[in-house]
Amino acid sequence: MKAVSRNWVASVHVALSLIGLPYAAGTSGVCMKNAISRIPSLCSSTSVNMSPAAHVKARCPVYPGSDTRRFPVPDDKLDWDTDWPQYSPVNYTAPTVLKKPVWADPEIGAFSPQFNSLDGSVDRRSHEGPYRIQNGKPLNPHGRTGLEGRGLLGRWGPNHAADPIVTRWKRDSTGQRVHRTNSQLPVLQFVSIKRLDCGEWAIPGGMVDPGERISQTLQREFSEEALNSLQASPSEREKIQKRITELFNSVGLQVYKGYVDDPRNTDNAWMETVAVNFHDESGNSVSELPLQAGDDAGQVSWIDVDSSLALYANHLLFLETVAKERHAHW
């Protein structure tokens, strides 16, 4: 995991795609129906020992949402610099992407994207730095995946997302912080949504729209998914917006920024994210607003931060960093 920075630069531009419900709803991993399972699997929730940038789930045998099987890639053949003339990746781009929705690029040859640069309103730069281009197509910076094309992802190259992690201290009836007996540390709570597409609990988040700043995405996704601001009355919307703006204008703790190991990744398209923690220290900001699920969220709740949680994709890794940085129970 990259070094944690307390300086949230709101002017950083990451503008990319809005990819339909199953895609835009989160940053990484593929959902499994068991929302509370504590057994990590290769392609869903992961243990805290695995980095978000590990290259494991991106080699899932069966590509999510399809019957397409990847060409098997052993660990010693990941690197593009490793000579492997036998490598024969399967070519797959999902039908939903091939229908040319507004959030998806055309096929290579039908347009000339400016990779590794800001291409109009679409930012094709990677958080990992410059990536290679081969035969007009970008190469996954973390190596072979056994599948070429875009799969479920709309953009060639990096597909950027943003994850707002909103936390508060758990308090008792007298307003005092609750401490866990085994660690003697205060307990953090975070806003979690239960995804409609799979039933797993997750950090609310989504894809960055073209031309949108990350700070805008973080605030928008939290408002839409956790507070259902899209369905609020004008007066309620104004109240919500004021509280949210105050919190998201505070100094955020950047938890992670970079490549995400995701089963939707391919040789030519991959997920990246920026995860930022916004903490309601006093408990009188968004903590007082009624949570109401919206967008792609089935339920929404304040959940105690604990290492035993099983969450969507690698969201538990982000929470571990938040807990340790804030000297909270883990």
Image: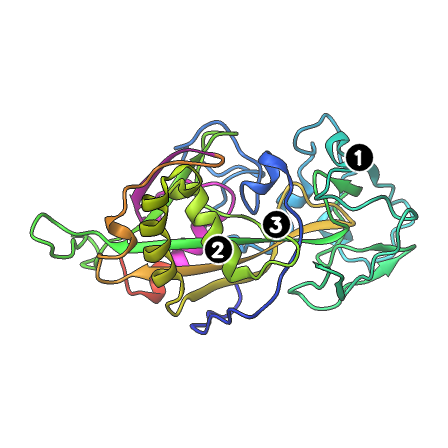
- Taking depth in this image into account, of 163 and 237 the one nearest to the observer is 237
Along the polypeptide, which appears first: circle 2 or circle 3?
2
Three-letter amino acid code at disc 3?
Asp
- Taking depth in this image into account, of 247 and 161 the one nearest to the observer is 247
* Residue pointed to by mark 2: 218
Badge 1 marks a residue whose secondary structure is helix
Badge 2 marks a residue whose secondary structure is helix
* Residue pointed to by mark 3: 261
Instruction: Specify the quadrant that holds the C terminus.
Output: bottom left
Q: Is residue 311 magenta?
A: yes
- Taking depth in this image into account, of 90 and 256 the one nearest to the observer is 256
Badge 3 marks a residue whose secondary structure is loop
Along the polypeptide, which appears first: circle 3 or circle 1?
1
Along the polypeptide, which appears first: circle 1 or circle 2?
1
Position of 309 with respect to 79 (left or right) is left
Q: Position of residue 193 (x, y in %)?
A: 40, 39
Three-letter amino acid code at disc 1?
Leu
Q: Residue at x 71, y 64 (%)?
A: 125
Position of 312 with respect to 92 (left or right) is left
Three-letter amino acid code at disc 2?
Leu
Is residue 173 depicted above or below 119 in this figure? Answer: above
Give the extent of the magenta segment: 297-321
* Residue pointed to by mark 1: 98
